[in-house]
Amino acid sequence: QRICVKFDARKDSRELCVNVLPREIVPQLPKRFGGLRVGQEVAASQELMFGGVVGVHFGVRGRIVGPHLPDRIEVRFEWRADGSHGTVSVQPFEIKPAAPFGGGFVVAQQVAATRDLVSGSQVLVLSGVRGLVLGPYSDTRITVRFDHRQDGRHTVPMNVLPCEIRPYPPEAAVVVA
């Protein structure tokens, strides 16, 4: 017994229905998971710890396999620091969509400030200082943790515009196909 399914997107970009067997499909994640979808490519939004050991490093890419328990998501990461190969059960805040966002940047990408970044009259980050993209802050801003801040708050990330950062090194720009 086959089921006719209209998917959100197809690899061939067509909009036709596909006849599938029930065992070939899984339900999507509930809305409470913030729009994350089964099959979506994601990245670890922080170091994922298993006990006192890092199991998955920040920025490692993975793919959502499905829901796990009422409030968790099962993800298969491309690489695990603990040497394991199984899926990881994460909470939604522990992953972010891996697709490029504002300005084409991605989670865990190395960047540098394109100019001195200021707040009022105080210089916070000098031009050329490197940083790490933590993720999108909004539709127009990106959260970056810079290696050095003039105000001494080195661990405090900043929300910047895409024009205020560039890939570092410059040849490391992400190409979106």
Image (cartoon, rainbow, N blue to C red):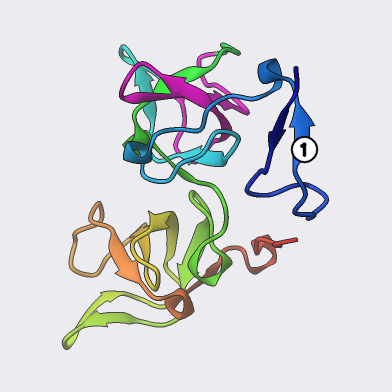
Counting every numbered tag in the picture gives 1
Q: Quadrant of the C terminus?
A: bottom right
In this picture, residue 162 sits left or right of residue 119: right
Q: Residue furthest bottom?
A: 121
Q: Is residue 78 magenta?
A: yes
Could you say where residue 172 lies in the image, as x and y percent from the top left?
66, 60
Check disc 1: other Cα within 10 Å, few if <14, some if 14-19, many if 20+: few
- 106, above or below 128, in the image: above
Q: Dividing the picture into quarters, in which one does residue 71 lie?
A: top left
User: Residue at position x 41%, y 78% from top?
Assistant: 127
Could you say where residue 167 lies in the image, as x and y percent from the top left?
57, 66
- 30, above or below 96, in the image: above
Q: Is residue 85 magenta?
A: no
User: Residue at position x 54%, y 62% from top?
Assistant: 105
Q: Dividing the picture into quarters, in which one does residue 17 lie?
A: top right
The disc labelled 1 sits on which kind of residue? Answer: Val
Q: Check disc 1 and report its element: helix, strand or loop.
A: strand
Q: Nearer the viewer, residue 123 or 99?
A: 99
Q: Quadrant of the N terminus?
A: top right
- 71, above or below 46, in the image: above
Q: Which residues are magenta?
A: 56-82
Q: Residue furthest right?
A: 12
In this picture, residue 152 sits left or right of residue 6: left
The residue that disc 1 covers is 18
Could you say where residue 164 lies in the image, as x and y percent from the top left?
43, 78
User: Residue at position x 16%, y 86% from top?
Assistant: 120
User: Residue at position x 25%, y 81% from top?
Assistant: 118
Q: Dividing the picture into quarters, in which one does residue 86 lie?
A: top right
